[in-house]
Image (cartoon, helix red, strand yellow):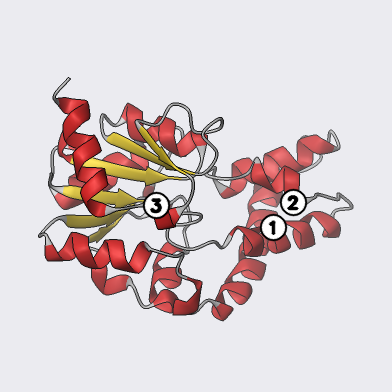
C-alpha cells in the first residue's frame, strides 16, 4: 500500500451546500430555478458541465455562446469563493482527521483528486494542506469524472502504482473514475448509488484504517 487518494467534497468536507447556494444564485440570475435534489446530480462533474445541465432544465443550452457560458460559470465560482471563506477546521467531516493522522503515521502518501478548482483554498481553510503530498490541479484537466484523468494526475504526482492505491469518493462518477484508473475504490454514502465501489461505508466515521487495509488485501488476494 503506497497511497490514499481522496476526493474533497463529501469526503473530507461537505461544501455541497455552498455549491448549491452559488449555483442557485447563478441560475436565478438567468431565470432558472434549481432545488437541492437537482444539485445532487452535479456532484463530481466540472463547472461548465454543471452549467450545461442547469441550462438544459429549461431547454436553454443554445441561448448562450461558449464565451458567455464561461462568464456565467466564473460568476458562479465568484459566489462560491465568497462562501467558502466561511470554511474552518470545524467543517472537516467526522473521522477524517483521525484517518489522515494514522495514514501519515504509517508512512502512506496522501493525495487529493478533486474536480474543484478551489480545492487548494478549501484545504487551507480546513488547515489540512500539510497532510497532502500532492494535490492534483483540476484546472489542468481536459476531462472531468467519470474520466480518470484527475486520479491519474494524482497517481503520477505521487509517483505510485495505481494498484497500490486506495481512492475515496462519494459520487458514482468518482467511483467510475477510480475504477478506470485501476485503483481500489472506497465509496462513502448510499450503497445503491455507489454499487460499483469495491468497498462501501455509510459515512466517514466508518472509515477505519485497519479495516481499509484488510479489505484492500482481501480484494487483491482473491
Q: Earlier in the sequence, mark 2 or mark 1?
A: 1
Residue 164: horizontal and vertical position, in percent?
15, 39
Residue 79's spot in the image, x, y percent?
A: 67, 69
Q: Is residue 222 above or below residue 210?
A: above
Label 2 or label 3, whichever comes before in sequence order: 2
Contact between labelled residues 3 and 2, with CB atoms less than 8 Å apart: no
Q: On residue 20, which mark appears?
A: 1
Q: Secondary structure at mark 1?
A: helix
Task: Write down the residue under mark 2.
Answer: 36
Q: Closer to the camera: disc 2 or disc 1?
A: 2
Q: Nearer the viewer, mark 1 or mark 3?
A: 3
Q: Is residue 118 above or below residue 158?
A: below
- Indicate whether 169 appears above or below 89: above
| Label 3: element kind | helix
Whole-number angstrom distance, CA of label 2 to CA of label 3: 25 Å
Residue 116 percent location from the top left of the image? 48, 56
Q: Residue at x 17, y 26 (%)?
A: 220
Tell which residue pokes out farthest to the top in this image. Answer: 222
Quadrant of residue 162 within the rendered picture? top left
Q: Is residue 143 visible?
A: no
The residue that disc 3 covers is 206
Residue 107's x, y, as percent? 10, 60
Amino acid at each position: 500500500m503506497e497511497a490514499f487518494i481522496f476526493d474533497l467534497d463529501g469526503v473530507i468536507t461537505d461544501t455541497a451546500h455552498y455549491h448549491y447556494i452559488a449555483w442557485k444564485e447563478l441560475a436565478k440570475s438567468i431565470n432558472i430555478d434549481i432545488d437541492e435534489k437537482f444539485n445532487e446530480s452535479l456532484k463530481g462533474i466540472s463547472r461548465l458541465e454543471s452549467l450545461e445541465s442547469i441550462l438544459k432544465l429549461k431547454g436553454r443550452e443554445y441561448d448562450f455562446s461558449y464565451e458567455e457560458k464561461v462568464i456565467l460559470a466564473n460568476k458562479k465560482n465568484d459566489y462560491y469563493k465568497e462562501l467558502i471563506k466561511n470554511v474552518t477546521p470545524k467543517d472537516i467531516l467526522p473521522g477524517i482527521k483521525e484517518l489522515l493522522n494514522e495514514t501519515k503515521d504509517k508512512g502512506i502518501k496522501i493525495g487529493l483528486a478533486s474536480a474543484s478548482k478551489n480545492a487548494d483554498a478549501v484545504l487551507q481553510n480546513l488547515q489540512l494542506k500539510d497532510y497532502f503530498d500532492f494535490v492534483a490541479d483540476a484546472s489542468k484537466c481536459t476531462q472531468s469524472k467519470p474520466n480518470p484523468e484527475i486520479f491519474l494526475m494524482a497517481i503520477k504526482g505521487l509517483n505510485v502504482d495505481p494498484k497500490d492505491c486506495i481512492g475515496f469518493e462519494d459520487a458514482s462518477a468518482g467511483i467510475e473514475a477510480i475504477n478506470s484508473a485501476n485503483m481500489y475504490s472506497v465509496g462513502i454514502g448510499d450503497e445503491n448509488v455507489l454499487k460499483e465501489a469495491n468497498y462501501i461505508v455509510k459515512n466517514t466515521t466508518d472509515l477505519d484504517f485497519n479495516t481499509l487495509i484488510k479489505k484492500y488485501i482481501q480484494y487483491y488476494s482473491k
